[in-house]
Image (cartoon, rainbow, N blue to C red):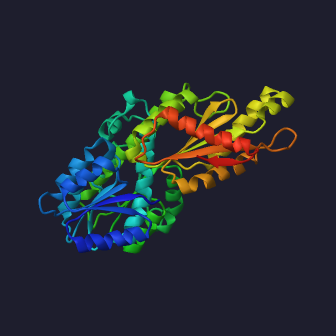
Amino acid sequence: MVGTILLIDEVSQRSALAQGQLMRLGYRVLIAVTGSEARRILFTINPDCVLCSKDLANECGFDLIFDIRRHPNMTSVPMFLFAPTVAGEDHAQAFAAGALGILPLPLDIAALDLRLDALIRGHRLMADLDLHLPIDTHMGLAEASAAFDGPEPVLSVFSRDLPKAAQAICDDSQIHTHNTSALCTLAGSKDALETLVAANRTTVFVGENMSAEEARTVLGLGAQDVIDVATRPASLPAAIKFHTRLAAAKENRKTAIQDAFQNSRFDTVSGAYSRSYGETYLTRLLGNRRRVGTLGLILLDLDRFKAVNDRWGHRAGDQALRDAVAAITATLRPDSSVFSWGGDEFLITCPGLPPDKLMLFGDRVLDAVNLVTLPDQSQLSASFGGTCVLQNESITLSELLHRVDMALYSAKNAGSGRGAIA
């Protein structure tokens, strides 16, 4: 999972080195020398991660992170401080400011990359959930976690020997704890950890005197964070509280979406999102282009679908629509959505998809739909039109829908089973 990183550091040689290492891993890196410059960047770009020096010339790094964290669009963005030397109290102060910790220099880019993979996925999920929520149910991290009262634990902590203070926090905060000494070894906890990660359960590993290789192994399995109580004892309670709040907010937002939309925002025949909700969602995407970036759009039409209803009846036709939606959904990225756009047409939103990837993605969707089998064992066929809206492009919803509709018209005129980009 790659993304955009805002690096705040006044030491140009150090920031240039980190920028080069991160860019080689596929990240886009923006550099700010001062807090003021960082704030200006945040007016136009919402990064996926913030790395900030603890020691800035005109501003304390802790204060800057605290200020950035208060921005509505930065609620779930992973942030880290870094410093040449790190004292025990620095970790607790970092968490209090809203960071996920303070990293010693030189930065271990490989270990950081593993942590960012899980953290950025979580951040993008939270941001996407925000776009789906009705305006009156939007809530910040604190409000979401305070409102969370679900029956299931929201965080799992793996530990060799969890200190009593941390255990008390876990007991009070609906946290699963797993003592890996009971599981014999770190490797013994692998299956349990992978199961929780696969279920999107937020997981934190707590160890003592862990080697760098052990930490990388745990992060590679998908743990959200690794805390070494030997080097970061003061940060443990703050870290557990932070991750609990973040996990609770994620669960609460997911529940809010399910409650708000399960009965009213889906097309009852196909199971896709409804057109009325799609228009609201698209309006919100267009209004959040600073975060979304490029917006890809696919309008797909099932070829000669009326013949399916005429030959086998509407029951078979409805089943074919449901199968088509299931096939389309299987090809989607985590931040993409599919909407029933009328009869046998479906609209697919692809936030962040670059223009040069849109045709390839559309062809992949067509291949998936072509695998849907009809009662006589023949396959469905579909055509699509696609378009991309660039981040700085000015366009209304009606103009966008007209453009993608014209692209579909071009594809249908060229024959069935084709795609066209406008």
**384 sits to left or right of 286:** right
Q: Residue at x 62, y 33 (%)?
A: 340
Position of residue 32 measured from the top left corner of the image (x, y, whole percent): 25, 60
Position of residue 197 measured from the top left corner of the image (x, y, whole percent): 50, 54
Task: Return the residue nearer the eye: 33 or 410.
Answer: 410
Position of residue 189 measured from the top left corner of the image (x, y, whole percent): 49, 62
Q: Residue at x 88, y 40 (%)?
A: 376
Tell me: residue 181, above or below residue 304.
below
Position of residue 278 measured from the top left corner of the image (x, y, whole percent): 53, 33
Task: Return the residue nearer the eye: 180 or 198.
Answer: 198
**84 sits to left or right of 192:** left
Location of residue 343 (image quadrant): top right
Work out which residue is located at the far top of the displayed protein and give it: 264
Q: Residue at x 27, y 67 (%)?
A: 230
Tell me: residue 219, above or below residue 171.
below
Location of residue 322 (image quadrant): top right
The reply to whether residue 153 is in sight is: no
> What is the tally of numbered marks visible in this picture?
0
Tell me: residue 267, above or below residue 94.
above
The reply to whether residue 102 is in sight is: yes
Work out which residue is located at the far left of the displayed protein and give it: 58
Task: Return the residue nearer the eye: 206 or 136.
Answer: 136
